[in-house]
Amino acid sequence: MTQPSALTSLSQANSDRKQNRLDRAIAKAQSALLQRQHPEGYWVFELEADCTIPAEYILMMHHMDEVDEILQARLANYLRAKQQEDGSWPLYTGGRGNLSCSVKAYYALKLAGDSPSAPHMQKAREFILSQGGAAKANVFTRILLAFFQQIPWRGIPFIPVEIMLLPRWFPFHLEKVAYWSRTVMVPLSILYSLKVKAKNPKNVDIRELFVTPPEQERGYFSHVRTPLGKFVLALERIGLKLEPWIPFRIRQRALEKALAWVTERLNGEDGLGGIFPAMVNAYEAMEALGIPPEDPRRQIAKQALKKLLLHRDHESYCQPCLSPVWDTGLSLLALQEVQRGEDDPKVAAAIDRALDWLVSKQLRDQPGDWQAKRPHLEGGGWAFQFNNSYYPDVDDTAVVAYSLLNSDRPEHREAALRAVRWIAGMQSKNGGWGAFDPDNTYYYLNQIPFADHGALLDPPEADVSARCVMLLSAAGKAVPYFREVAKRGLDFLWRQQEADGSWFGRWGSNYIYGTWSVLMGLEHYGVPKDDPRVLRAVAWLKSVQREDGGWGESNDSYEDRHNPSLRGRFHTSLACQTAWALLALMAAGETQSEAVQRGIDFLLRTQQEDGFWRDEYFNAPGFPRVFYLKYYGYDKFFPLWALARYRNETKRLC
């Protein structure tokens, strides 16, 4: 019989082997992440969206008659590679075919020279027609088709530039919609009001994609079904008929105001709003207003678009924006967790460089649209992109400020406390936080025909609010007022919990991300681990763990938000989602649970030779059900963060 001392020795040996394996995995991931740091101190990883963005880049080149044949060929290669077996293009890897995305991809490929009789084009056309044809595409797709004279102007919403002159008390005002809606709509209203026609030098059409000839189509707004929506549509159609009677002086004044608005926010080589759709509209609007190609405004707008291009092998794609502040903030949190368990001078130096870079990017006294709601609040936020001074991001600011609070350097802590004050001032009346604006809850605006995408607004969400609670709770140890603000945020989070114990993830896929975000916030606030609501969240996370020990969730859970069976489910585990679940469980006191042990084993087993992990699938929504993203940094810093926390927690518990 084996003696107890022998069993103890065997157990210790196994424990030592696992510890050594964990240490090696952390060292490899840490080294790989440090190698990706830019000399200036930041990290920035690829940010890939669906095929609408590269397709729109090709369409933009033909709209402006500025076709770069080599770039067009590379973009077309990317589009062809993403087509699915049924001929469609999805909004995320493995998703079902999307009509609007498929219409844009088809048109872009036809403009690039692909024959409609080619097998892949025939399959795409069959899919599009099976979905009702191009007339049933979403509003943004139909607007593009109107510019290319493929559908009549009556087939798109009424977007007169006179929206620039509406008073704040009017039911619709720019300040009542989200920042992304503002930056897209203002230049779009210029294009609409001037009834712009794309140059389309090869005169390529897509009439073959319509079930009914577009000029005879009467169902462009068949998606409007609610009584309020139909009422608003009727008013809008009346406005459309009255448009010719708008006095020239008023239209001219509105056009001038719109151009001034865009010019103030051009944002250098980072572009209007830092996002591709707004940047494209701004570039085309300048041409429509007669601004010559040599004008600095137009040149820099064009350069901003080129800056989004990413080239690899024989193909290219266009990113929707760049994410250096977000990537840097999250990389820092992972490395700071590593440093809690060891004192590595290289890691410490990398952290200091990153924090210094972030402090240099803090938005303090710059004008911003958020000031319309908070005119007396001092600035202190960070944008998502390299530069986007009008639109600091609450979520990014909470992450960055938290990482700065972990520093002992006075200049870092001063920047952090300024950000904490800004975050506290950006709280909405219901206790939560939106991504860019407080109290952006004018839900009736989702009934206007332009808003068929359901993403016109920026209301408070659980994931953003949870990170604000996390930050304010940390700052509240020294300043009690911040803890009071955090308490209101906590009450908001409790109201957002689903019946099964999970939380919705607005900015990451999906309920695993939302539940991780909230449990981290609850831990920092000091909510007891045995709170029934915490236990319910823990039980839900354990219930969706996969057999291989990992976690995975498809973006399908956004497509049918009210179907609990889709939450936290996928046919495969992803490293980033496994890391979120592990961080959530450890925040809830589950470090020694079997679920956490199995999850850690999954990460150790799936780490690649280069120190990173490889997730194939998209991991975030830009806008649920409309636009999805793949953050290429998520499978690099999140698993490192989870492994480092596990090591630190197990040492603490020993």
Image (cartoon, grey):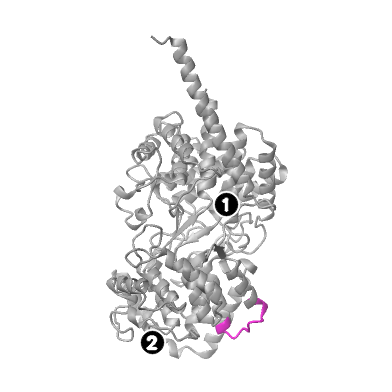
Image: magenta residue range: 287-297
Residue 323 x %, y %: 57, 57
Q: Quadrant of the N terminus?
A: top left
Q: Marks 2 and 1, Cα distance to the nearest angstrom?
A: 48 Å
Residue drawn at 44 percent across, 28 percent down: 592
Residue receiving disc 2: 241
Q: Nearer the viewer, mark 2 or mark 1?
A: 1
Residue 558 x %, y %: 36, 56
Q: Amino acid at mark 1?
A: Asp
Q: In the figure, 401 relative to 225: above or below?
A: above
Residue receiving disc 1: 327
- Classify residue 529 as left or right of residue 338: left
Q: Check disc 1: other Cα within 10 Å, few if <14, some if 14-19, many if 20+.
A: many
- Classify residue 105 as left or right of residue 636: left
Residue 293 x %, y %: 63, 82
Q: How many marks on residues? A: 2
Q: Amino acid at mark 2?
A: Lys
